[in-house]
């Protein structure tokens, strides 16, 4: 099934988007669907019903690329067995591998990289098969129509694109380009629009959230942005994802300490705590800086929930370095921990360095995840008996008898849930008071309390 480069898609067709990878990519998928919908394409709930299937890929590490290719091949099957006439591949993997990927995926009718997302309607309706301009990046603003995909009540808001850091293991700056921040007014306007449409929680995302505004003049900084967002009427929760450890400064901690609508939650991807590994990673901080930061956050912000991501099996990580990471996790008792096994990525500085074998990295990943499962379970058990505000996401994915939501310490998609009993109306977006009755490793069960 080889693609025909002169093929065009009729904008009255039905469309389904498969969004892979991170929250930032989800924002791109929502912008893509918004553009296509405005042009006349009609979104459908199931891929089998779609005449156009678009797979928005992730090209960050090997495992993500495998998942992306599998998703493209699965979608290509729909051209044989379903209604699909046009298969579009978009996103990071296209941006990174461009023409090579186009040659390897003859099933794809159109391919569009992250730099060219705004041109999707033009590409679909015109000649040509691939657009992925190197050295460019695209960043949406408040004028773009977005098609919310997390529900009517919660949304990610991307405040900047790209990254100016040069972490040795990371291919992102090569894919997404250098840091480009949105003007503060555009972000505030977008958040106002989202709130007017029913959103109660915004989750601020960026490759490096703490670098927000560094390329703007004057430099508002993340704390400045938060001060303006605090004033948006009707916004209940503002959540911060991806704060670079050495950049979480007093101004930011001060804004967190001021409390709602900024929730007591911070995602700080520390990656490691061993000084030698951190040096090889080019992270620009030491293990003790990380430990001090966790103490400062806990000291300044009441009941803060902390999330991090760790990278194991990186060049330089010997048994002793890994043991220090295990100790750190045991002592820091973080609420949510994601662990990645190192994947050598072409065109990154770490690629040329020798790393522990991949089976060692996978075993270390498993060891940390097992330890964290216990820590998470213990921490959640301390919430039994507590009364929490819970934002309802909808019916529970586990049983129709319960609704599901999240308390302020749980981010969408990546953290656990609160399963709610006694909630007659599980419509997303209600903020209810609930008493925690049971806890598991990642989730809570709570009873909704009557309104006072
Ligand atoms: S901060 Fe480092 S790990 Fe994060 S996107 Fe930038 S280069 Fe990659």
Image (spheres, rainbow, N blue to C red):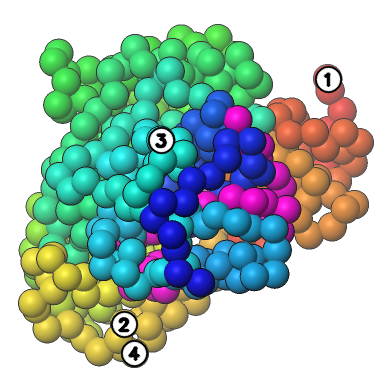
Circle on res. 359: 4
Quick check: marks 2 and 1 in contact, CB under 8 Å?
A: no
**What distance separates the C-alpha of mark 3 from that of mark 1?**
55 Å
Q: Position of residue 91 (x, y in %)?
A: 37, 51
Nearer to us of marks 4 and 3 is 3
In the rendered view, tell whether residue 283 sits above or below residue 15: below
Residue 81 visible in the snapshot = yes
Helix, strand or loop at label 2? It is helix
Q: Earlier in the sequence, mark 3 or mark 2?
A: 3
Assess whether residue 382 is covered by the magenta stretch.
no
Residue 294 visible in the snapshot = no
Q: Earlier in the sequence, mark 4 or mark 3?
A: 3
Q: Earlier in the sequence, mark 3 or mark 1?
A: 3
Image point 25% across, 89% down: which residue? 357
Nearer to us of marks 3 and 2 is 3
Find disc 3 in the rendering and name its residue.
122
Image point 12% across, 70% down: which residue? 350
In the rendered view, does 348 fall on the left or right side of 31?
left
Quick check: marks 4 and 2 in contact, CB under 8 Å?
A: yes
**What distance separates the C-alpha of mark 3 from that of mark 2?**
44 Å
Find disc 2 in the rendering and name its residue.
361
């Amino acid at each position: 099934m080889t693609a025909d480069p002169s093929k065009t898609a009729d904008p009255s067709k039905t469309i389904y988007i498969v969004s892979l990878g991170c929250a930032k990519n989800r924002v791109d998928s929502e912008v893509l669907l918004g553009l296509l919908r405005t042009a006349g394409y009609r979104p459908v709930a199931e891929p089998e019903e779609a005449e156009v299937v678009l797979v928005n890929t992730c090209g960050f590490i090997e495992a993500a690329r495998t998942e992306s290719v599998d998703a493209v091949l699965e979608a290509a099957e729909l051209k044989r067995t379903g209604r699909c006439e046009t298969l579009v591949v978009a996103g990071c993997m296209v941006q990174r591998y461009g023409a090579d990927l186009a040659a390897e995926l003859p099933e794809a009718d159109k391919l569009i990289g992250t730099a060219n997302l705004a041109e999707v309607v033009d590409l679909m309706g015109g000649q040509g098969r691939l657009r992925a301009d190197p050295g460019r990046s695209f960043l949406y603003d408040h004028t773009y129509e977005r098609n919310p995909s997390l529900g009517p009540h919660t949304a990610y808001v991307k405040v900047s694109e790209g990254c100016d850091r040069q972490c040795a293991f990371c291919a992102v700056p090569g894919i997404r380009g250098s840091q480009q921040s949105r003007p503060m007014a555009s972000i505030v306007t977008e958040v106002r629009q989202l709130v007017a449409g029913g959103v109660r929680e915004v989750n601020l995302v960026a490759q490096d959230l703490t670098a927000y505004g560094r390329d703007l003049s004057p430099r508002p900084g993340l704390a400045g942005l938060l001060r303006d967002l605090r004033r948006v009427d009707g916004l209940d929760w503002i959540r911060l994802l991806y704060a670079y450890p050495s950049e979480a400064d007093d101004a930011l901690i001060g804004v967190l300490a001021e409390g709602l609508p900024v929730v007591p939650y911070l995602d700080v991807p520390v990656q490691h705590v061993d000084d030698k590994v951190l040096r090889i990673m080019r992270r620009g901080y030491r293990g003790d800086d990380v430990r001090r930061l966790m103490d400062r956050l806990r000291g300044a912000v009441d009941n803060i929930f902390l999330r991090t991501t760790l990278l194991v099996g990186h060049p330089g990580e010997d048994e002793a370095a890994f043991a220090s990471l295990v100790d750190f996790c045991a002592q820091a008792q973080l609420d949510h921990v994601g662990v990645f096994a190192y994947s050598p990525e072409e065109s990154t500085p770490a690629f040329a360095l020798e790393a522990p074998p991949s089976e060692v990295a996978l075993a270390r990943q498993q060891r940390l995840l097992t330890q964290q499962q216990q820590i998470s379970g213990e921490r959640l058990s301390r919430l039994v008996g507590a009364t929490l505000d819970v934002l309802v996401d909808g019916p529970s994915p586990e049983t129709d008898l319960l609704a599901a939501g999240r308390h302020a310490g749980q981010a969408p998609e990546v953290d656990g849930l609160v399963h709610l009993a006694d909630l007659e109306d599980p419509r997303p977006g209600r903020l209810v008071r609930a008493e925690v009755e049971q806890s598991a490793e990642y989730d809570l069960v709570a009873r909704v309390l009557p309104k006072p």
